[in-house]
Image (tube, grey):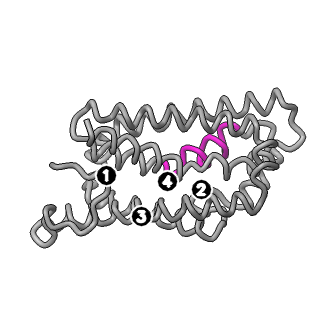
């Protein structure tokens, strides 16, 4: 029970840090400038539903994707950890991560009539970082039942993102530039620790004879006993 709770908390926090709903508020306002409140709400709802669908597919089918591509779990953990680390470093510098989208893409999106699918749903919400996160968390699941916390985390983050974007004006005014910067740096530090743990896990899985699991120096709550 304790392991399941710890795994659930890490899944929820890791996905929250990567998606960063609060940091998306000013970007959402830029992309939907000139839209009515009703259209903004519809855009946020559509993007969050697509986000749930995409991450659900990668959570359940991640193992099959590994097999089809011939990619080992250890290699994916290392690559995913490095990707999350790049995102974390950008958050620590209070900078929009280029692994999600660029300033040029945001500027172009502001000229589009519908930004719900691209770039809001993909890649801002269901981007490389969030996809890698759910796939690595699913790979850590000890049993199929352990996928439930990951899927629940996706739903919770989708709901949190929807209501944050729905109230983007209020969130942006309430947090302010300094408030968002402080929050992003704190979340970036925590995400960096999670990313490093994924890298450590990947190296340890790739070279078990050199780094046996019972001698791991870094142990986070989602570490299993297998």
The structure residue drawn at horizontal position 54% and vertical position 38%, both measured from the top left corner, is 157
Residue marked by disc 4: 129
Q: Nearer the viewer, mark 2 or mark 1?
A: 1
Q: Which residues are magenta?
A: 116-130
Image quadrant in which you'd find residue 102: bottom right
Q: Earlier in the sequence, mark 2 or mark 1?
A: 2
Q: Position of residue 216 (x, y in %)?
A: 20, 66
Q: Earlier in the sequence, mark 3 or mark 2?
A: 2
**Pointer 4 and pointer 1: residues touching (CB < 8 Å)?**
no
Q: Is residue 194 left or right of residue 206?
A: right
Q: Earlier in the sequence, mark 2 or mark 4?
A: 2
The structure residue drawn at horizontal position 73% and vertical position 40%, both measured from the top left corner, is 115
Nearest the camera: 190 or 226? 190
Give the quarter of the figure containing the N terminus.
top left
User: How far is disc 2 from disc 4 in space, using C-alphas?
Assistant: 8 Å
Residue marked by disc 1: 221
Residue marked by disc 3: 193
Element under label 1? loop
Q: Earlier in the sequence, mark 3 or mark 4?
A: 4
Q: Is residue 47 left or right of residue 40?
A: left
**Pointer 2 and pointer 4: residues touching (CB < 8 Å)?**
yes
Q: Nearer the viewer, mark 4 or mark 1?
A: 1
User: How far is disc 1 from disc 3 in space, using C-alphas?
Assistant: 12 Å
Packing grade of label 4 (10 A; few <14, some 14-19, many >=20) is many
């Amino acid at each position: 029970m304790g392991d399941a709770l710890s795994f659930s908390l890490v899944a929820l926090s890791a996905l929250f840090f990567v998606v960063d709903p609060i940091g998306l508020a000013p970007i959402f306002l830029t992309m939907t400038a000139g839209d009515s409140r009703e259209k903004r709400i519809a855009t946020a709802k559509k993007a969050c539903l697509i986000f749930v669908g995409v991450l659900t597919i990668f959570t359940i089918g991640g193992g099959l994707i590994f097999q089809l591509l011939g990619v080992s779990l250890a290699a994916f953990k290392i690559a995913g950890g490095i990707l999350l680390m790049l995102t974390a470093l950008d958050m620590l510098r209070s900078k929009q991560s280029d692994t999600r989208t660029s300033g040029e893409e945001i500027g172009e999106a502001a000229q589009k009539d519908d930004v719900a699918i691209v770039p809001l749903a993909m890649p801002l919400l269901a981007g490389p970082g969030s996809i890698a996160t759910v796939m690595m968390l699913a790979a850590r699941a000890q049993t199929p039942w352990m996928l439930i916390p990951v899927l629940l985390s996706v739903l919770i983050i989708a709901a949190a993102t929807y209501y944050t974007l729905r109230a983007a004006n209020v969130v942006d005014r309430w947090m302010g530039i300094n408030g968002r910067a402080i929050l992003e740096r704190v979340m970036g530090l925590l995400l960096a620790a999670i990313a490093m743990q994924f890298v450590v896990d990947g190296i340890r899985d790739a070279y078990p004879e050199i780094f046996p699991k019972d001698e791991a120096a870094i142990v986070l709550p989602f570490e299993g006993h297998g």
